[in-house]
Image (cartoon, rainbow, N blue to C red):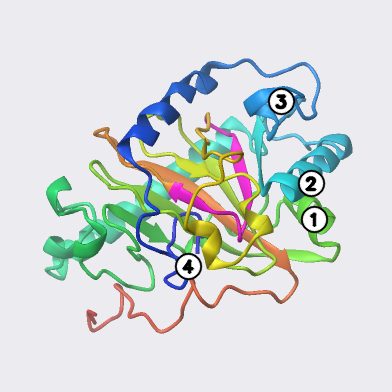
Amino acid sequence: MLLRALHVDPTLFSAGTRLRHSDLRSALTFKRWLHERPQKSPGVLEHGREAWSIFVEGGAGRRVGDDALRSASKVLCDTGFVILRGGSLYTAAELAEAQASAEAALARTKDRCASLGLAHRTPWARQRSQHTLGGLVEFEFAEAISYSAGRVDMPRLIHEPPFDAPPWHSHPDILQLCHNVFGTACEQSILGAMWSFPGACETGWHRDGEAPMLVVVTATSDYPSDVGWIHVRPHSHLNTRAGALQRRPRHSPPIPAPLRKGESLIFMYSCVHAGMANFTCLERCLLYAVYGPVGMRDTVNHKSGFPSLFAPDGQKK
């Protein structure tokens, strides 16, 4: 998946679709987004590049409100993504606990890889000069998968605390938003952490698939603008054929989606997006959740059958 938030669908990826460095330099001019003040009322801003943002009132961890959810649903259907800014779906304590849990899971994975002699294959150990899509070293385990150089997806956190209980599991506002968009009862199927390590390259433009599903990406910590944020392409969800990736429509330039701590980016599975290069010395964590109609599952990006890093016999791929 993504994306899942940052995963490449091999049937949709095509040569020449990676973001150029000139595009990245232009996109970074949006870094002032990280310092904008929330507005006094929820709703869609009517001007320019902020038309996809919904500002949330009421403080961290409170319900978003029906009006804001309706506005978010409309933006999501029209644009393919929406950013919940200002407030948060989670309290400061919930964000801190989630960040600590994700870090602990990564630490356990690193220790296990070291004990199994896999250090040379891990995404966090390879140098930037090796971070090319063509030279990606295979790293596929049930608990940790690398779909692009310098990144690792940890897709099985939904059964670990605090992610196995509300608000991280089946958040009522996200369930309502999903129902508004798809017109049917919805549920959460995945919660994971996407890590980008220092020197990680760009992922290339891709969509997670064409299923009626949403990806909810939340920043549980503050990061600088050049840490490798997701960029999204407005309206790309309206054309789900591979040809839409061949060239960038002039009226829909890519949009950087930096997030402050607690803010969330929500996008359609069919929305074209990419993860940018990580030019910092930081290990960046973004939590992601997948929501969709009851019974809907992603079997393309979340495949079964990968060996476990923590199998009793130390099974390795």
Q: Nearer the viewer, mark 1 or mark 4?
A: 4
Disc 3 element: loop
Looking at the image, tell me whether mark 2 or mark 4 is earlier in sequence order: 4
Q: Secondary structure at mark 1?
A: helix
Residue placed at 50% from the left, 38% from the top? 220
The residue at which mark 1 appears reads as 181
Amino acid marked by disc 3: Gly
Amino acid type, callout 4: Leu
At which x and y percent is residue 47? 72, 22
Q: Is residue 280 left or right of residue 173?
A: left
Q: Which residue is mark 2?
A: 73
Q: CA distance from mark 1 to mark 4?
A: 24 Å
Contact, CB < 8 Å: mark 1 with mark 4? no
- Which label was assigned to residue 162? none
What residue lies at 34% left-to-right and 41% top-to-bottom?
20
Which portion, as a residue range, is magenta? 261-274
Looking at the picture, tell me which residue is in the foreground, 96 or 141.
Answer: 141
**In whole angstroms, how far apart are the C-alphas of marks 2 and 3?**
21 Å
Q: Is 262 covered by the magenta stretch? A: yes
Mark linked to residue 59:
3
The residue tagged with tag 4: helix, strand or loop?
A: loop
Task: Answer yes or no: is residue 69 visible.
Answer: yes
